[in-house]
Image: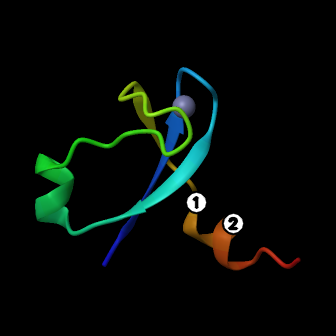
Amino acid sequence: MPYYDYRCTKCGETFTVKMSFEEYGKKRVKCPKCGSAKVERVYVAVAAKTSKKS
Ligand SMILES: [Zn+2]
């Protein structure tokens, strides 16, 4: 299942939502921190994500 990265335009929280493509078209994504629906998609390069070492 694909992951979608979002950023809340209200509080600036970034979060990842895991959902199917079908859900993506229907689901209302809300910020888990403040509950705002004013979120925007964040496009993260896959390479940058997988190569990250902590
Ligand atoms: Zn928020």
| Residue at horizontal 55 percent and vertical 20 percent from the top | 10
| Residue at horizontal 30 percent and vertical 79 percent from the top | 1
Q: Quadrant of residue 51?
A: bottom right
In three-dimensional space, the C-alpha distance between marks 1 and 2, rounded to whole angstroms, equals 5 Å
| Residue at horizontal 37 percent and vertical 39 percent from the top | 30
Q: Quadrant of residue 24?
A: bottom left
- Vertical relation: 27 (above or below) 50: above
In this view, the residue in front, 42 or 12, is 12
The residue identified by callout 2 is: 48
> Does the beta carbon of the residue at mark 1 sit less than 8 Å from ligand 1?
no
Q: Please state the horizontal and vertical placement of residue 13, each as a whole percent of the image.
A: 62, 38
In the rendered structure, which amino acid carries the disc numbered 2?
Answer: Ala
Ligand 1 located in image quadrant: top right
The residue identified by callout 1 is: 45
Q: Secondary structure at mark 1?
A: loop
Q: Please state the horizontal and vertical placement of residue 28, each as a whole percent of the image.
A: 23, 41
Q: Please state the horizontal and vertical placement of residue 33, each as a whole percent of the image.
A: 56, 40
In the rendered structure, which amino acid carries the disc numbered 1?
Answer: Ala
Q: Is residue 51 left or right of residue 26?
A: right
* CA neighbours of label 2 inside 10 A, class few (<14), some (14 to 19), many (20+): few
Q: Is residue 49 left or right of residue 2?
A: right
Q: Residue lying at the far front in this picture: please name it.
A: 34
Q: Quadrant of the C terminus?
A: bottom right
Q: Please state the horizontal and vertical placement of residue 31, each as a whole percent of the image.
A: 46, 39
- Vertical relation: 35 (above or below) 27: above
